[in-house]
Image (cartoon, rainbow, N blue to C red):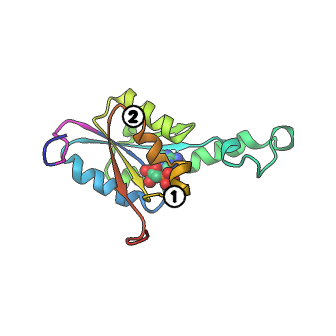
Amino acid sequence: MTGDGRVSGGQKVLVAIDLSDESGEIIERARSIAGDGDLHLVHVQEPMDTVYMGVVPFGPVFPGVDEAEDKLRDELRKRLDHWATRFSVAAGQAHLRYGTPASEIKALADEIDCDLIVIGTHGQKGVQLLLGSTANSVLHGACHDVLAVRVGAKGDD
Ligand code: AMP
């Protein structure tokens, strides 16, 4: 990064989005920092057994999980492509990964050798902070600069 907080031309910025409406705010912020730099987007599909553990019975009692994950992947791909098109990010730079969000974001950052990771944060504190968040997990252990963009309602502390 340069002294004024922008990355210089030709550098890569990886923007992690959860595909919620707040994604636009995060990408816009990344775009303003990236300037001429190259934007990459990433969304990570979490395995259903992680997301619904304890809520939905799995194994032989839920044989449709693979098909459900395939359908979800198609839907997530469409939503990710929507954000990529809206912000003129090349299709090859909109990455859909599968796994634990923080680990996959860090792994992709290594693979594409980016200069900066941009991620949203709701400014968790108290119990939420103790439990951790994707932003916290990326911040702790990333080998790259990380910018956490505060998203959500102003004055929500
Ligand atoms: P959270 O930890 O859920 O409050 O999310 C904070 C930020 O982490 C989001 O604004 C995104 O930047 C990023 N994030 C959360 N979940 C994902 C995901 N599944 N894929 C990519 N980025 C994510």
Q: What is the residue that sits farthest to the bottom in this orientation? A: 155
Tell whether 139 sits left or right of 114.
right
- Which segment is the magenta one? 5-12
Q: Main secondary structure of the magenta part?
A: loop
Q: How many marks?
A: 2
Would residue 77 be seen by someone viewing this image from the given angle?
A: no
Residue drawn at x 22%, y 36% as measured from the top left: 11
Question: Dot 1: within a 10 Å radius of its alpha carbon, few (fewer than 14), some, or many (20 or more) residues?
Answer: few
Query: What secondary structure is marked by label 1?
Result: loop
| Position above or below: 13 against 112 | below
* Residue 18 x %, y %: 49, 52
Q: Nearer the viewer, residue 28 or 83?
A: 28
Image-quadrant location for residue 141 = top left
* Identity, as a three-letter code, of the amino acid under mark 1: Gly
Residue drawn at (50%, 35%), measured in percent from left and top?
103
Q: Is residue 104 left or right of residue 13?
A: right
Q: Residue at x 18, y 46 (%)?
A: 6
Q: In which quarter of the image is the N terminus?
A: top left
Q: Residue at the far left: name it.
A: 3
Q: Is residue 157 visible?
A: yes
Structural distance between the alpha carbons of marks 1 and 2:
23 Å
Q: In which quarter of the image is residue 63?
A: top right
Q: Name the residue under label 1.
A: 126
Q: Which amino acid does label 2 sit on?
A: Ala
Name which of mark 1 and mark 2 comes first in the sequence: 1
